[in-house]
Image: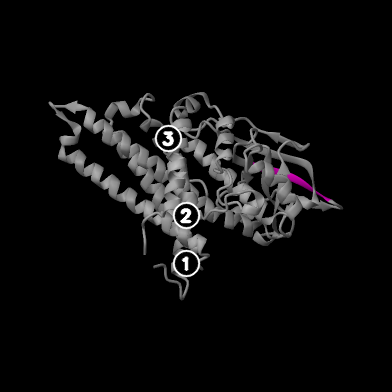
Amino acid sequence: MDFELNEEQLAFAEAAKQFSDQMLAPNASEWDQQAHFPKDVIQQAGELGFLSIYTPVEHGGLGLSRLDAAIIFEQLAMGCTATTAFMTIHNMATWMIASFAQPEIAEQFSSQLVTGEKLASYCLTEPNAGSDAASLTTSAVRDDEEYVLNGSKVFISGAGDTDVLVVMARSGGEGAAGISAFIVPADSEGISYGKKEAKMGWNCQATRMITFENVRIPASYLLGEEGEGFKFAMLGLDGGRINIATCSVGTAQQALNEAKRYMTERKQFGRHLAQFQALQFKLADMSTELVAARQMVRLAAAKLDSKHSEKSAYCAMAKCFATDVGFKVCDQALQIHGGYGYIKEYPVERHFRDVRVHQILEGTNEIMRLIIARRLLTEGVELL
């Protein structure tokens, strides 16, 4: 098994690093403090292909693997966690539209989504349907050549600032089999947006409730067939879990880098912090766990690319482990900074806040453990 990146992957990583260093890192603190959504910079990322990394080439995307995407997102997250996280959501929505919409509809939307001319949000979670997504109640009723949507979604990243929504709604009976997926223009009549939520982190992207009141969309905006929405949602979430896990790894790597730099600059008791063995050991543990998390994420991405029969379990394992490690590393990096780590002037304070939500979204880590355990207890299943 070769753990080394090939020349193409190294080139992608370098391009992402340059963009991260030049466009994201210098502005991340200001965006966070001013709750500014950097549409212009996100659109520049689109010009480099970072908004359509695994969207099929025939629809204008790069057509890369999920492993390639993980490598790119890790570098971007080192510059700004929250902006990169939004890019991962946009990538997922764009991929779903390009992959499952009718060809002419896919072309209509993809041409603007891949460049960032239009941005997309993903709408699954509801006020009473979080971890139990199959119980969602937003309805989609067929009326001749249209669907009529009613209901609400919560915790929607980018809501109010994006142009296209991928919405999961109930078009049939109870349970997962009754859920379908739809493309909904964000400015459709009958859509209203709630207040911008005041959050602990991810402040540069808005999080709002979306309410649908008799929202009419063409029947051609259905993704796939009726009843396939939950399947598409789960496919999207497998990739989404890889994406958010790699955002944790990238952010934690940046926090680790900053902790190392601080230890070589800060003196106490007449010596640099880097000379104290207790802190050396702390740094060693942080780095070891981070390397393990990175490799687990890349393994899961490779399983997803190869369509391994247990790909969902591997994605759940990677998401659970990497987001736990990412938060732990950022916490320890803050601790190494002492009181300065608690001050907004130092980036580790923002890293700590931004990675915390990663243990919740794309399925809580408790749900990840449930997915893993169920597969382990299924006869004939081995996760090696």
Q: Residues within 10 Å of mark 2 (few under 14, many from 20)?
A: many
Image quadrant assignment for residue 173? bottom right
Q: Does 204 sit above or below residue 358?
A: above
Amino acid type, mark 2: Leu
* SS at mark 3 in the image: helix
| Residues in magenta, as a range | 146-153
- On whether residue 382 falls in the magenta region, the answer is no
The circle drawn on residue 353 is 3
**Which of label 1 and label 2 is nearer to you?**
2
Q: Residue at x 75, y 50 (%)?
A: 105
For disc 2, the marked residue is 67
Mark 1 Cα-neighbour bin, 10 Å: few <14, some 14–19, many ≥20: some
User: Which is nearer the N-term, disc 3 or disc 1?
Assistant: 3
User: What kind of residue is marked 3?
Assistant: Arg
Q: Is the stretch drawn in magenta largely helix, strand or loop?
A: strand
Please name the residue that numbered disc 1 is placed on: 375
Q: Is residue 255 left or right of residue 107?
A: left
- What secondary structure is found at the residue carrying circle 2? helix
